[in-house]
Image: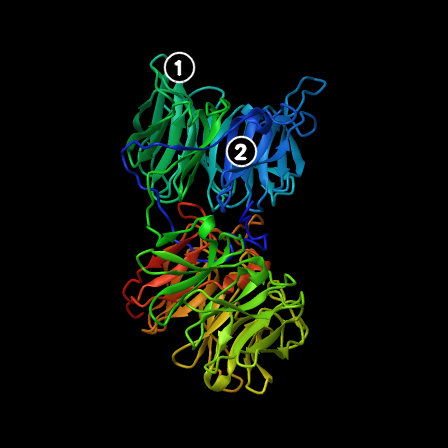
Amino acid sequence: MPNSLCWSRRAPQLACLLVAVCLALPCGHAAAQHRSLFSFDAPHGAAPSGVARARDGTLYAVTRDGGASGKGAVVAVSGGTVTHLYSFRGLNDGAAPSSVVLGSDGALYGLSTLPPTSDAAQQSALFRLSVAGELSVLSRLNGGPDSLVLVLGQDGALYVSSQAESAVLKLGAYEGGLAPVFRFEAGTWANALVVTRRGELFATTLPPEGPCHVVKGTRAGAISVLADLPLAEDGSRETPTALARTSDGSVLVTSQNVDRYAVYRWKRGSALLALGTLDAPVHTLVAATSGNVVFGATRYGTAGQGAALFQVAGAELTTLARFSGFPAGAGPRSLLATANGVYGSAADGGEGGVGTLFRYRAGEGLTPVYAFSYPNGSGPSSLVLGSEGALYGVTMDGGPHGAGTVFKTDVSGTLETLHAFKPAEGAYPQNVIEGPDGALYGRTLRGGEADFRTLWKLDKKGELTTLLQFTEQRQRSGPKLVQLSDGTLYGADTAGSGRIFRYVSGERKFEEVHKFTGLMTREGAHPTGLVAGPEGVLYGVTRGAHGPMIPPPFSSGTVFRLNKDGTLDTLYAFNDDKNALGALPGGVLLGQDGLLYGSTGNLPFLCNVVGNLFKLDPRVPDSKPVLTHAFTGREDGTGPTSLLQTKSGRFFGLTLGGRGYVGDDPACVVRNSTLFEQSELAGFRTLEQLDRVIGASASSIDEAQASSLIEGADGRLYGTLASGGSAGAGELFVFEPPPPAAATQ
């Protein structure tokens, strides 16, 4: 499967390379058609009951029936190809899986029905399935699947609501330790729930008697009732069937009482508001990725109508589409709201008559400049502004040979593939720069005669020249290339302690300039950024050891200067001040004022490393960096990278993640990158909170630094998004900077 999140060298992670722009789902009122993605058959599974979607667009579905043993299955669907991952046997692994969620570790988690015990007590298995198809049972739970609800909290932890225990259990760090975090009165069950990024609970509960409730649970475990669902005139109660929470804090609830199917909204400071009724029960609701919109589906239709796909925008309830049975399917079971549309599973219908996966997409919010598809390149990873005003970039995957491409585009969205790599030329281009001669230069991650990567040059007519075939495996990764005015290319390798090399174009000569001495020296190791200074001097940073607050003698990063004679001066070692300015620098740029500007904390999966921005005067001996912004890991983000100074002198950057950082939560998961501006006069401000993470793995930081945020000839900011778009293969985006902020008083 292409693009399997951060762990593949071929498709280096949706989360790790690039800039993201949030795509909002419009809330149009016109009905539109959904599209069938895949029709099930018995060998692959039948009657899909749950679906999950990875950031690369891969859909995972569990089926209650079918598979090799007829006990249910798990399949993956990507690019129109279905892959069978696992068939349940009905033994210790259970049968008839009823739900599935995709954990932040990339594995699938779900519930299956275990064989009855000797006392006929029903139990369920909480299982973990790796993307390689290896299944393990984490826990045995009392009760059948209908008495258990599994959700992935917005804080990244897994939660199970158990009717037998009258509690919501939390799976700590996905390692099997289930512990109750929210307890209800005996006999009360939460049958629908959402856990926020702060670890708060919103749920619907069914007490032994009286009206059902909409409740809130604090991080301390305290439960309070927000609203009661109404009782009918005969005293019967409405039973909640589904719940969703929107970005403004509103809670949508659907309920059932005999043949009445109602939709309600609760909003802070207001009573429970009835929005309308539907013609069939609703068992799934999902909030859109942005905006105060909720999507839902009825289980069936009446009077010859198919099941309804509907939305609630504010207080307005709108039917979007009806399921016809063929070819789109019937009996929708689960929904996913993404920036590219609403995905779901239907337990019936389709070409094989046993269910489908479907997608509904009314349109896109922020319009990308270009949406990639695999044939013309997948996973754009770098951009450069050409001297003539066009944008050039590379894709790390896709193209006719599956090895990546070099492309040219303009602001209208017209894209031209200049070159499609063949593995013998190099594969998976990492980054691109424009040389003084107007040609494009870059490196590949793989390929070439020995499959160790290549150094290449491409003129703007598309003619490729392989400058160097690397012959050693250790020459495998490093930061973006730098080219001096004389045409000499400089780069770095980060394997081992790392080194800086140069390639003299006229002499076709490759030579090592400096080899770093290692983690236990003040010189440091693992160069991750290079920038050309005046008179042939290079500046850069080393990342050092992979960990927070690394004590001496282990390096936690340095700022260095490489002189023309090949000697290296350590301008600052972050250990010197016990990491007062952070650790793990991820890049540096030379400002128009001659100062170096950089960032620390570029490993956001370490929950206590969020990062800082700093500046340093390299012209002053023994100068120390000055802190310009300390990130909190919340609204401002975590893991700053991709720093840019525009022609007007303004500073912009991106974070690898943010808005999901919870320092005291062991299940910390970083979410949602940010686009920010740093001003000398006005300070720091977050410009855009994005809906994706662009970095999460130590092994991918080098590639993340190769991503581009650039200023176009029109003064707007351009960047790349490794996934998404109409084909799910990535996008180019444009951002119009707001006017400069006023000076801080």
Q: Which residue is mark 2?
A: 61
Residue 334, given in percent of the width and then of the height, sits at 46, 31
Q: Is residue 27 above or below residue 720?
A: above
Of residues 272 and 509, the one drawn nearer to the viewer in this rendering? 509
Residue 23, x across and y down, in percent: 37, 48
Q: How many marks?
A: 2
Q: Residues within 10 Å of mark 1 (few under 14, many from 20)?
A: few
Residue 716: image quadrant is bottom left
- For label 1, the residue is 258
Residue 332 lies, in percent from the top left, at 44, 26
Quadrant of the drawing holding the C terminus: bottom left
From the viewer's side, name the closer residue of 192 and 451: 451
Q: Nearer the viewer, residue 739 or 411?
A: 411
Query: In whole angstroms, how far apart are the C-alphas of marks 2 and 1?
Result: 31 Å
Closer to the eye: label 2 or 1: 2
Classify residue 575 by image quadrant. bottom right
Question: Would residue 640 appear left or right of 118 to someone viewing this image?
Answer: left
Crowding near the residue tagged with mark 2, few <14, some 14–19, many ≥20 C-alpha atoms within 10 Å = many
Residue 279 relative to residue 86: left or right? left
**Label 2 is placed on what type of residue?**
Ala
Dot 2 or dot 1: first in sequence order is 2
Q: Is residue 98 visible?
A: no
Residue 363 % position (x, y): 33, 42
Q: Left or right: where does residue 486 sit relative to residue 277?
A: right
Q: Identity of the amino acid at label 1? A: Val
Instruction: Mark 2 and mark 1 in contact? Answer it, CB < 8 Å.
Output: no
